[in-house]
Amino acid sequence: METAIKDLTIADEKIVSKSAIGNYLKEAFKSVGEITIFGGRFFKELFLPPYEFKAFFIQSYKIGNKSLPLVAITGFIMGLVLTLQARPTLAEFGAESWLPGMVALSLIREIAPVITALISAGKIGSGIGAELGSMKVTEQIDAMEVSAINPFKYLVVTRILATTLMIPLLVFFADGVGMFGAFVGVNIHNHVTLIRFFHQAISKIAFIDIIPATIKSVFFGFFIGLIGCYNGYTADNGTESVGKAANTAVVMASLTIFIIDMLAVQIIDLL
């Protein structure tokens, strides 16, 4: 009797577990579908007048200029740490002269775009989600609709365009600061002039290294803005939904960044 009860309990737990997984997958696919529809509306509204140029420039300033200090600190640390970590290994093979080129390729191809995008997802994505979520909760979006203003174009289109433009620029900025951090790391143990260091680094870089990273950064910026705006614009009523929108925006954007990066690496490898 006890054995039969245990078997029934185990069977019930398995059913509950399968049901939970099924509900999770259902919600995941539902979210993907809703974000896809939301993105389709963005492209539809993008080409319809009126064009909110002033709001676009304001958002670009907020997203780009106010993110520079954080990106600069992170980029400098990336270049410095990567140099200090790689130097002993290259020194064992007498290949320290390869260090500037190796650091430059690592930063430009992979490290700077991904880390900058993750930082932007945490800072910019959460900020957009919280801002639009609070506007939705306080019914400011409804007030804009009553005032004959298109809130989607004014709030969503401008922010997505701003992130799409500014994230690649922030990545370029992180590349430059990261290279300077690498220069400082090299000069901790050796003495190399700035001109010689950058000559050795740039000589190893080709356009095939820059173009895929730039395209990847554009996609990073687009999806950071899209996911942040979606979670904020569709937030539920209640103050707790603001924090939920910001948290969900960060998690979804970070996961999307890794997926895009994985697909980009596979595509580049096939070329």
Image (spheres, helix red, strand yellow):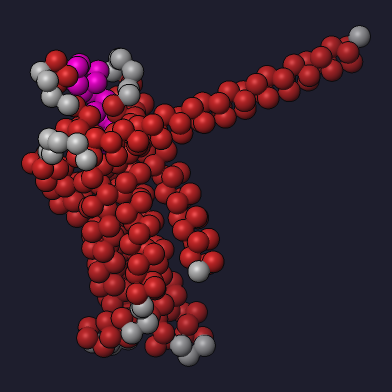
Residue 251 visible: no
Q: Is residue 262 magenta?
A: no
> Is most of the magenta stretch helix, strand or loop?
helix
Residue 54 drawn at (x, y percent): 8, 41
Residue 205 drawn at (x, y percent): 35, 78
- Quarter of the image for residue 130 reads top left
From this view, report whether residue 173 is shown above or below residue 226. below
Q: Residue at x 19, y 21 (%)?
A: 141
From this view, report whether residue 60 is shown above or below residue 26. below
Q: Residue at x 72, y 20 (%)?
A: 15
Seen in the image, is 15 located left or right of residue 236? right
Residue 23 visible: yes
Q: Which residues are magenta?
A: 125-142
Name, please, the residue furthest toward the top. 1
The residue lying toward the viewer, choosing from 99 and 16, is: 16
The residue lying toward the viewer, choosing from 177 and 34, is: 34
From this view, report whether residue 63 is shown above or below residue 269. above
Q: How many marks on residues?
A: 0
- Quarter of the image for residue 212 reads bottom left
Residue 231 drawn at (x, y percent): 34, 29
Seen in the image, is 50 located left or right of residue 220? left
Q: Is residue 129 magenta?
A: yes
